[in-house]
Image (cartoon, rainbow, N blue to C red):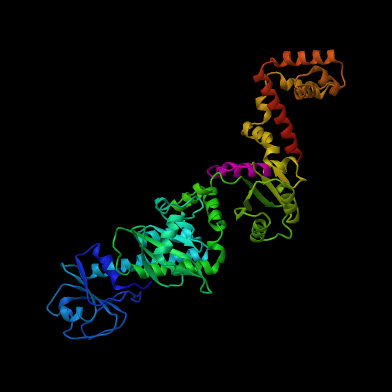
Amino acid sequence: MKLNGDIIYRGLKQKYNVSISGPCSTELVLGRPQFYMESEDVFASDCLYLATAEHLPHRPQIRRNSVLVCIGENIRMKYYSDRMCLITVHNKADFFRVFQAIQDIYDRYDSWEKELYRYLLNEGDIRSILECSEKIINKPMIVLDASFRIIAVTQEDLLSHWDADNNGFLSSQNLSSFLHESDLMTEKKGAIRLDVNGVKTLNVNLFDQNDQYQGCLCIWQGDADFDAGEERLAEFLAWMLEQAIRKNPQILYNEQSSMKALFRTLLEEQPITPSQRWALNAANRKTEYACVCLEYSGRKNRIPASYICDLFEETFPNSCALITEPDMVCFMENREGTREKLNEFVQSMNLTAGVSEGFSDLYSIRIYYAQALSALGNGQLMKPEEKLYYFSDYALTSLIINSLGDLPAEAYFPKGLKELLEHDSSSGVSYFETLRVFLEENMSFTSAAKRLYVHRSTLIDRIARIERDLQINLDNSDDRLLLEIILKAVETEKLIKQT
C-alpha cells in the first residue's frame, strides 16, 4: 500500500525524535523507501528516500512530491525543506534501524490492505471491514445508510451520543443536527470535516456504481485535532466500503449478511466482537426462531448446498442459512403455518431435517442447534421413512438415550427384572408387557385389564408378583420412574437394532 509523508512521520514519531517541514502532499503515492546514493543528484517525483545529513548533495534536482527522511542535520537543510517534504531524525540513530522502522510502517498498512481485500473477496459485512480498520484509524467509527440509520459501529458508547434506538435510527434531534451540519452534502466526494453536537467528525460519503448516495462513513474525532493525512486513509477505507456495496448492493439495506455472520460466530462459539455484541443485544428476544438442520437424503442428484441455502432464505423471509460441515444449518422465524411449508421444501429438495423448539434468546443458540441435531439423528433412527423431525416429538427419546450413557439398558435393571424377562421368553404370560401397559395406563387396573384382555383380579395378582420379584413398590414415584425409563430404553434399543 502506498503512503504519504504525514503517515511516515507519525509512524517514526513513535520511536524517534523527528520533525516534519516543507511542502507535503497528502496523496497516497509513496512506495517503500529507497537508499539515497551519493552519485545521484535527483530526487524523483512521488518517491521516498532515506539518507544521512553528511551524504546529501549541495543542490540536487528535487521533483514534485518527493519525500526525504534524513538522519541528522546540517546547514543545507533549509534548501531541502523549501522544496520537498523533509522528515528529520534529530538524535543520533542507526541508519538501518531507521530503514527497518519505515519498512515496519509499510508492513502494517500492507497487512491492513490485504485484510480488507480478504473481507471483500469473502463477502465480509460492513462491521467486519470497520473492525479490521480500528488498528489503523485508531478512532471510533460508524456507518450510516442513505436513511441516516446506523448500521455499523465500532464502539457502543457512540450510540448513546447519537441517541439511536435499537434499530439504529437517530433521534429526530440528532438527525436534524447532523443534516444541518452536513447541509445535506450528499453529492460531495472526499473527506468532510464536520462538528456534530460539538464533536469533531471526519466524514466520507459512500456511492454505488451509479454514483447514487448510499450512506456515510463517520470517524469520531471527539476533542482531538485531526491528524495530517488522515483524510486520505478515511477516503481509502470509504472506497473499500463502496466496493463491498457494489459487490453486494443489499449490504446496506438488510441485516441478513451481518446476522448471518453473527449466527455463525455464535454457532462456532467464537469470540463476539463489540459491534456484533451491539447487533446481538439489539436483535435479542425480538424474534422467535427455530433452528433447522438439513441433510441430504441420498447421494444421487445432489443439489449444491449454496443453492439450497439461497432458496431457503428466499422461501422463508428473514431467515439465515449457513453451509456447515457436513451439511446445512438454517435459522427461520418460528411462525404458524411454517410446518407445512418446511415439509414441502424438504421434500422438494430431497432432504431430511431436524427442527428445534422455538427460541428468542440468541445467546442460547447452541442449545437449539443441539436440539435440531438430536431430532435429526433420533428421527432417522426411529422413523427412517420420514423426512422432517421435530425435537418436541423426540425429546423423550433423546433424554432416554442420553441418560443411558455408554451402558446398555440392561445395566440399569433392578434385581429380578432379568429373571422376569427370561420367564417371559418361555411362558405364555408376559409380565414385562403387563408392567408396560399398567404403567402406560397410569396404574389403572381397570383400563390395563381391558387392554390386556384379562380379568381385573388376574392383573392384580400379576402386579403383586412383579413387585415381589423386583423388590419394588410401584406406589413409590422413584421406583415407578426408574421402571418407566428402563421400559422406554428397552423399546428404543429394539428400534435401533431393527434399523
Q: Would residue 169 be found to the left or right of residue 426 on screen?
A: left
Please identify the quadrant where the N terminus is shown: bottom left
Q: What span is in magenta?
A: 358-376
Please identify the quadrant where the C terminus is shown: top right
Please state the horizontal and vertical placement of residue 252, each as a whole percent of the image: 53, 62
Which of 100/263 is in front?
263
Which of 107/388 is in front?
388
Residue 237 within the magenta-colored segment of the rendering: no
Residue 364 within the magenta-colored segment of the rendering: yes
* Total numbered labels: 0
Q: Is residue 188 above or below residue 429?
A: below
Q: Which residue extends farthest left?
A: 75
Residue 297 in sight here: no
Instruction: Tell me the quarter of the picture where residue 460 sits.
Output: top right
Residue 275 in sight here: yes
Please state the horizontal and vertical placement of residue 130, each as a whole percent of the image: 43, 60
Dominant SS type (magenta): helix
Please state the horizontal and vertical placement of residue 73, each as a whole percent of the image: 14, 74
Instruction: Tell me the quarter of the picture where residue 322 sits.
Output: bottom right
Q: Would residue 388 be found to the left or right of residue 31 on screen?
A: right
Which residue is pictured at 80% across the width and 17% down the height? 445
Please state the horizontal and vertical placement of residue 318, each as a whole percent of the image: 62, 54
Q: Is residue 467 above or below residue 397?
A: above
